[in-house]
Amino acid sequence: MLNKSSGCPLAWKSKIRPQQPADSLRYVTLDLASDSHARAAIEAYADSCSAELPWLADILRARLERLNRSAERAQDQFAGLQEDGAAPMPLTYCEHTARRLMAFACMCARAREDYSAAAWDHVMKSFDRMLVQMR
């Protein structure tokens, strides 16, 4: 079992070392309270399993939402995204995944004849500002 709940890098807590096969890896324990990579992994897992296991996705998202409400997570809210009287909407923990998908969307848009470089530049700058503010 590979354990990351202490916040240490994976290789430090595991018998598996860099550049060794990880065939025996079956379980990973993640510390949501202190590891932003764990939060990104749980968010991605909830998104991935939501169609087949909506109850599990709801439980995982509820846990992330409780972390968002805690004092130490308050900086992860983007005040620009909120409805009247609602709390700020949390942004993704999967910044790298979000950036990769936006770059892919932009690449697909460039292939179309109605592509607008100015419009995509505006979208990408706004998206980047939101992600930077999330850190």
Image (tube, rainbow, N blue to C red):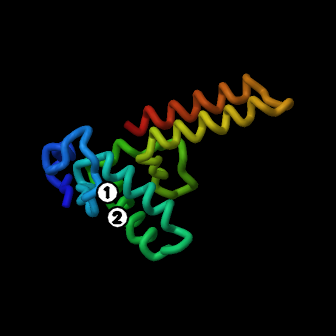
Q: How would you rate the neighbour count of disc 2 (Cα within 10 Å): few for under 14, some for 14-19, many for 20 or more?
A: some
Task: Identify which amino acid the numbered label 1 is placed on.
Answer: Leu
> Which residue carries the number 2 mark?
63
Q: Residue 40: image x %, image y %? A: 38, 50
- Looking at this rendering, what residue extends furthest in the right direction? 113
Q: Quadrant of the image for the N terminus?
A: bottom left
Task: Identify which amino acid the numbered label 2 is placed on.
Answer: Arg
> Which residue carries the number 1 mark?
67
Give the quarter of the image for residue 84.
bottom right
**44 or 131, nearer to the observer:** 44
The residue lying at 75 percent from left, 29 percent from top is: 110
Asked if marks 2 and 1 touch (Cβ < 8 Å), the reply is yes
Q: Quadrant of the image for the C terminus?
A: top left
Q: Residue 131: image x %, image y %? A: 47, 36
Q: Secondary structure at mark 1?
A: helix
Give the quarter of the image for residue 12.
top left
The residue lying at 16 percent from left, 44 percent from top is: 8
The residue lying at 19 percent from left, 48 percent from top is: 16
From the viewer's perspective, is 4 left or right of 53? left
From the viewer's perspective, is 116 left or right of 31? right
Q: Residue 28: image x %, image y %? A: 26, 59
From the viewer's perspective, is 20 left or right of 106? left
